[in-house]
Image (cartoon, rainbow, N blue to C red):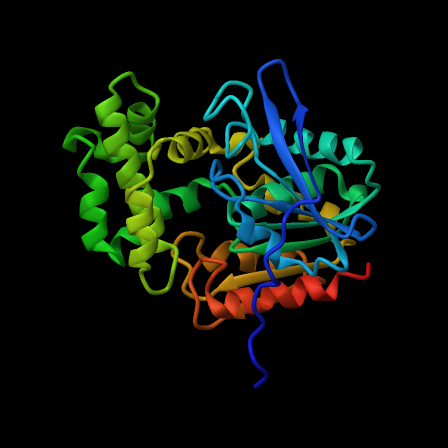
Amino acid sequence: MSARRGLFPKIDPFHTGRLKVSEIHEIYYEQCGNKEGNPVLFLHGGPGSGCCPRERRFFDPVAYRIILFDQRGAGKSTPASELRENTTWHLVEDIERLRKHLGIDKWVVFGGSWGATLSLAYAERHPNCVKALILRGIFGSTRRETLWSNQDGACYIFPDVWEEFLAPIPEGERGDLMSAYYRCLTGVDEKKMIQAAKSWNKWKLATCNMFVNDDMIKKAEEEKQPHLYPRIETHYVVHGGWLKTNDQLLKDVEKIRHIPGTIVQGRYDVVCHMETAWAIHKKWPEADLYVVPDAGHSSSEPGILHQLIEATEKYKTL
């Protein structure tokens, strides 16, 4: 077996900018790599996590014009953690506005987890603007998936961490943990907000790798503003991603079957279980599906990373 691929070398942006997308919101974006290269858009997860320098490195900087942006309220976009005018469809139109702003005709779109959700939503609404899709650990934003991750499913695999996840929520409110967390994270009691945020973040990080990454959890516990990401994520979760129907993204896959695609899925992904990726692949058999047998959800797991780099190499000359 050939050696697994790793990230490309560290790289700095050749251009950064800000784009006003509404009366309230302004998004941060950056471009790296080859100014004349094949345009590729990276969509971060969460929702609400923002981009980081590591994510520039999924792409060959000689071949690609690499574009990253922080979604509304996330990362360097402002105002921080703002929930007004912050829905899936606002983000989809932000992507299209950014494409036009940068003078790009069509681009490769790359997203994992929530980024895969947004990639699908964008491609299904603007299929003529997408050269190829690279999707990892797909989240379809269905009720079934959110219950699995945050109410009744993953808790049976991580009962020890689950006890800590339950702790900030009064026993009488645990029948709907997502709504209870949302109330804490959007309430006026700062102490409860911070406690809930830290518990939410720890639960997500504890479950995202096949083997728990203690260093990652420790780093998150030291976060000075831990509420920013979970505040946005719970906002999206309790509203079902603003989809017209529970299975809208799956139903609309027919609109993108002409687009080349690669789906990368960890067999033991507890955050975004494999059922969704499998269902989408059945509706979109033209897309390549790679099930990584020794991985969970995180893009940092060696088998996941290898397949993602394989995909970006495949599409770099489109």
Looking at the rendering, in which quadrant would you find the C terminus?
bottom right
Outermost residue, left side: 171
Outermost residue, top side: 23
Percent x, y of residue 185 = 33, 26
Task: Identify which residue, 105 or 222, lies in the foreground.
Answer: 222
Q: Compared with residue 66, is residue 311 higher up or lower down, i.e. above or below? A: below
Q: At x 46% / y 28%, what residue is drawn? A: 239
Q: Compared with residue 125, is residue 65 higher up or lower down, i.e. above or below? A: below
**274 relative to 179 in the view: left or right:** right
Residue 43 seen from this side: yes
Image quadrant where residue 86 sits: top right
Outermost residue, bottom side: 1
Q: At x 58% / y 64%, what residue is drawn? A: 7
Task: Identify which residue, 123 or 305, lies in the foreground.
Answer: 305
Image quadrant where residue 183 sits: top left
Task: Identify which residue, 156 or 164, lies in the foreground.
Answer: 164
Q: Compared with residue 53, is residue 60 higher up or lower down, i.e. above or below? A: below
Looking at the rendering, in which quadrant would you find the N terminus?
bottom right
Percent x, y of residue 12 = 63, 49
Percent x, y of residue 272 = 45, 52
Q: At x 47% / y 32%, what residue is drawn? A: 236
**249 relative to 302 in the view: left or right:** right
Q: At x 46% / y 73%, what residue is drawn? A: 293
Residue 152 seen from this side: no
Task: Identify which residue, 13 or 144, lies in the foreground.
Answer: 13
Q: How many marks?
A: 0
